[in-house]
């Protein structure tokens, strides 16, 4: 039985039970150009954001709670270069993201080779020209 949806990556819902996640990290990289000056510290001029990366990690127990089909769908979207919108249950819009990496660590295989546990990590990079709600309102996400 799947629990309530807490976040979605395109059509793929993250739920309390089933396809859930245990961690979410965000990293924003901005660029500053250094301008040489005479008689004082060099000046810095902001030239804009370079990239924003979101990393989502979790553990699936496919036999007990499912979720492997959803992870396989995200992998398929990544293989086909399909950008996906990332939104949270609270209505926060993180923007459109490219799935750059899908890592899996499958263990506790049964006699059919099906994993009982699958730890995963998704690396998403926000696409240029898409704003998150935090950028529009100044609210930290």
Image (tube, rainbow, N blue to C red):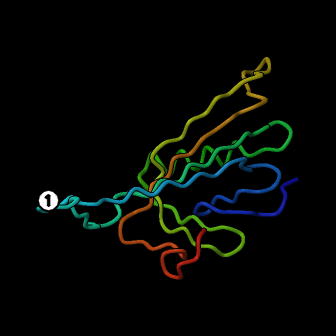
Element at label 1? loop
Which picture quadrant has residue 103? top right
The spot of residue 10 in percent (x, y) is 58, 63
Q: Going by the picture, which residue comes out furthest to the bottom?
A: 137
Residue at 83% over, 51% down: 17
Task: Using residue 89 as the reference point, say whether residue 135 is left or right of it.
Answer: left
The spot of residue 66 in percent (x, y) is 78, 44
The quarter of the rendered structure image containing the C terminus is bottom right
Residue at 73% over, 39% down: 59
57 vs 50, nearest the viewer: 50
92 vs 82, nearest the viewer: 92
Residue at 47% over, 48% down: 78
Q: Is residue 118 above or below residue 55?
A: above
The spot of residue 120 in percent (x, y) is 64, 38
Q: Residues within 10 Å of mark 1 (few under 14, many from 20)?
A: few
Task: Using residue 78 as the reference point, say whether residue 139 is left or right of it.
Answer: right
The residue tagged 1 is 36
Q: Going by the picture, which residue comes out furthest to the left?
A: 38
Task: Using residue 78 as the reference point, say whether residue 117 is left or right of it.
Answer: right
Q: Is residue 6 above or below residue 56?
A: below
């Amino acid at each position: 039985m799947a629990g309530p949806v807490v976040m979605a990556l395109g059509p793929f819902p993250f739920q309390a039970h089933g396809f859930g996640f245990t961690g979410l990290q965000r990293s924003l990289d901005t660029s500053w150009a250094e301008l040489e000056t005479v008689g004082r510290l060099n000046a810095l001029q902001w030239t804009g954001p370079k990239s924003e990366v979101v990393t989502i990690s979790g553990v699936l127990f496919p036999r007990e709670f499912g979720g492997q089909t959803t992870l396989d769908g995200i992998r398929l979207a990544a293989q086909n270069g399909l950008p996906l919108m990332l939104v949270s249950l609270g209505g926060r819009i993180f923007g459109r993201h490219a799935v750059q990496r899908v890592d899996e660590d499958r263990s506790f295989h049964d006699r059919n080779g099906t994993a009982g546990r699958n730890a995963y990590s998704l690396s998403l990079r926000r696409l240029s020209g898409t704003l998150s709600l935090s950028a529009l309102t100044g609210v930290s996400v």
